[in-house]
Amino acid sequence: MNESVPRRASIRDVAAHVGMSVSTVSRALNGYADVSRKTRDKVRQAADALGYRASFAAATLRSRQTETVTFMVSKPWTKFVDPFFLGLLDGVEMVLQAQGYDLQVVMAREYDKELEIIRRAVERNRCDGLIFSRTRPRDERIDYLQARGFPFVTIGQTNRNDHDWIDRDHAIIARTAIGRLARLGHRRIAYLSTPYRYTYSHHARAGYRQGLEEAGLPHDPTLEMECFLSRRTGGEALTELVTTGAAPTAIFCGNDMIAISAMDAMRRLGLVPGRDIAVIGCDDMPVAALTDPPLTTFSQDLDALGMRMGRMILAKLGGESAPLQSFIDSKLIIRESDMPPMPEGAGQ
Amino acid sequence: MNESVPRRASIRDVAAHVGMSVSTVSRALNGYADVSRKTRDKVRQAADALGYRASFAAATLRSRQTETVTFMVSKPWTKFVDPFFLGLLDGVEMVLQAQGYDLQVVMAREYDKELEIIRRAVERNRCDGLIFSRTRPRDERIDYLQARGFPFVTIGQTNRNDHDWIDRDHAIIARTAIGRLARLGHRRIAYLSTPYRYTYSHHARAGYRQGLEEAGLPHDPTLEMECFLSRRTGGEALTELVTTGAAPTAIFCGNDMIAISAMDAMRRLGLVPGRDIAVIGCDDMPVAALTDPPLTTFSQDLDALGMRMGRMILAKLGGESAPLQSFIDSKLIIRESDMPPMPEGAGQ
DNA sequence: GCGCAGCCCAAAAACGTTTTTGGACTAGCG
DNA sequence: CGCTAGTCCAAAAACGTTTTTGGGCTGCGC
């Protein structure tokens, strides 16, 4: 179809053009020290003139280096949830490209496919390092990569936790939220959890319980509800709590989507979100500032998170062998959804 | 570091294992017709047993085929704007993977870098086809690819328009919006445009003007304002309109972000969005349903758009040479922000 | 028995780099 | 002058596939 396009210049052409050997050209282009500055300049100039670029396939075939990091994005990060994702990528890409690395993103539709996607990438040698998230307490992706010694960084921890990760400290976040609600005077505080298949949900729950204890509040298991994106949303969980008569006066939600969904349900039940039931979310999605009332929630500095991840994976590729593990800051953003409880007897 | 991992099985190993030649194994694995079914099964089985996977680099080096499509996402698609992006990717990926193609995403921080990114991908042979968006009236990315005969599909048109694209019909969208606002009784309708560097902004403006004409309304150039994400946001444009005394009673916004920003400014000016100034947006971002008042806007079926793009690029890779160009449907989603104008004299 | 398809397969070339190996030249030192 | 170290470079091997080329079987028709 495009036969008319002249064959691309190869390294041989460049070598012929400058009257040097192929190996010298290669070494010059790759910045090796044992080629004189004059030679290097001459080679580079010739390469530019001929429009030469090293074939990616040939280079990685020989060197076994792709200079590429793959970021696998899990499917439930979609629609509403994904502002998180893109902000993150931005940070990662920024630090990778500064070191000459390419960032590639692949999508995983279902969790079942994630391991296969990783195996493909690793075994076909399509990247030098991996980044992914949504870690689970027992995560086969991590088992696989650890066994193979392949460099990777995750967002989130696991039970084994002997690998490289970065995470928010969800235990502290939850504790902080409960502490604040308790100080406002709430005594029945529910935890609307993200799915327990993810490790961080457990950390948040632990923080929730610790927060209750510190505030001297009893732990009522019926106030802990696991929520999902489709089946039993935050709204459905809240409705359940209210209609079974176990209504809390405040809720802490594992993420903003749950909080928004719950506030929606409150309105449907004739309750005023924030006033009748206080709510604190987590993530500080852009929408959080726009809800009614504006949502009190926990921020995350996505750029910082992304850049930190980029630096971590680069460190790994550079040969760092000690596990790199770190928490990233998260601040409570106080808006208007966390009001004190209604005075006794003033309710319905 | 990971020297202990046994060398990966190569095609030679599986050939030896089944006692056949390397070429037969290759042909069997790649499903050529001239290898018997029995042989193929035997080979596949051996490959599985040995955990063999063809080296990506070696395969593309020889065959010049990457079986990969690259999607370049432009930077201004970030934070708030990106639900668009991820929904799209989902559709594309779905149809690509059904044909055994991989989808890769790369990010472009600034427009200046986009051409360079494309050149790198094409000239280093990292993909067989490209998808990108945010087309401009004169778009050097497209000039480059067309000249090279490299397969690509864009979201959006250009002035040359002799390439493959998919787009919403922004002229019709704008016309529809103006028509509706005019029928509601509005006579001063502003157009808060997306940046004119993008082709579709011009189409929308043309539709806006045509809509005015069809409604028998005069065209007042001061009611056309170009808006950006940072400098002169929708809110700033609206403030300008109102404070210079040229206030419209309705606005049509090139996208939902502009609309949201404008509604925000209205409140700051003591105006009630929807009631004092009607607003219609475009995109139907998830937030649109949550604004106050809920935003009337134009939908886009992202899955459908993505899948259509996937099919288009596959057709191109399959050798289709005629230009593929198509519009994708967009429906007006009526919510509450497009109210009739206030009765004369009832203002402030 | 011979020729001819049709099916199956093996050997080797080719893809375009990077890396290894080894050697030539120069400068410095005794 | 001879030796050594340092600098620069060339030739060739290697990476792991796919594709090309060519050839050996088997069965069938004559």
Image (cartoon, coloured by chain):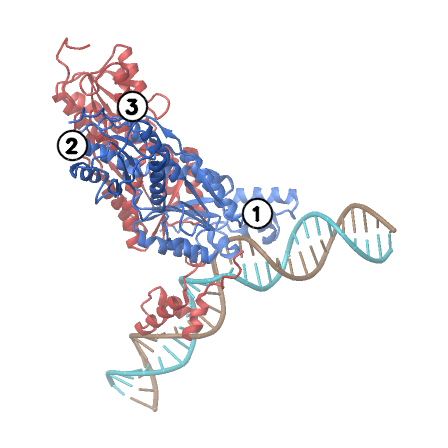
Chain colours: A blue, B red, C brown, D cyan
The chain to which mark 3 is attached is B
The quadrant holding residue B248 is top left
Q: Mark 1 against mark 3, which lies toward the viewer?
A: 3
Q: Earlier in the sequence, mark 2 or mark 1?
A: 1
Q: Are marks 3 and 2 in contact (CB under 8 Å)?
A: no
What is the secondary structure assignment of the residue under circle 1?
loop
Same-chain status of marks 3 and 2: no
Q: Residues within 10 Å of mark 2 (few under 14, many from 20)?
A: few
* Residue B108 or residue A115, whichever sits in front: A115
- In 3D space, how far apart are the residues under numbered discs 1 and 3 (Cα atoms)? 49 Å
What is the secondary structure assignment of the residue under circle 3?
helix
The quadrant holding residue B324 is top left
The quadrant holding residue A180 is top left
Q: Are marks 1 and 3 in contact (CB under 8 Å)?
A: no
Reply above or below: A192 against B35. Answer: above
**Which disc is residue A268 wearing?**
2
What is the secondary structure assignment of the residue under circle 2?
helix
Q: Disc 3 designates what residue? A: B261
On the question of residue B17 being in view, the answer is: yes
- In 3D space, how far apart are the residues under numbered discs 3 and 2 (Cα atoms)? 28 Å
Q: Disc 1 designates what residue? A: A30
Measured from the top left, where is residue D20 in percent x and y?
42, 65
Measured from the top left, where is residue A4 in percent x and y?
40, 49
Amino acid of disc 3: Ser
Q: Mark 3 against mark 2, which lies toward the viewer?
A: 2
Q: Residue at x 12, y 22 (%)?
A: B183
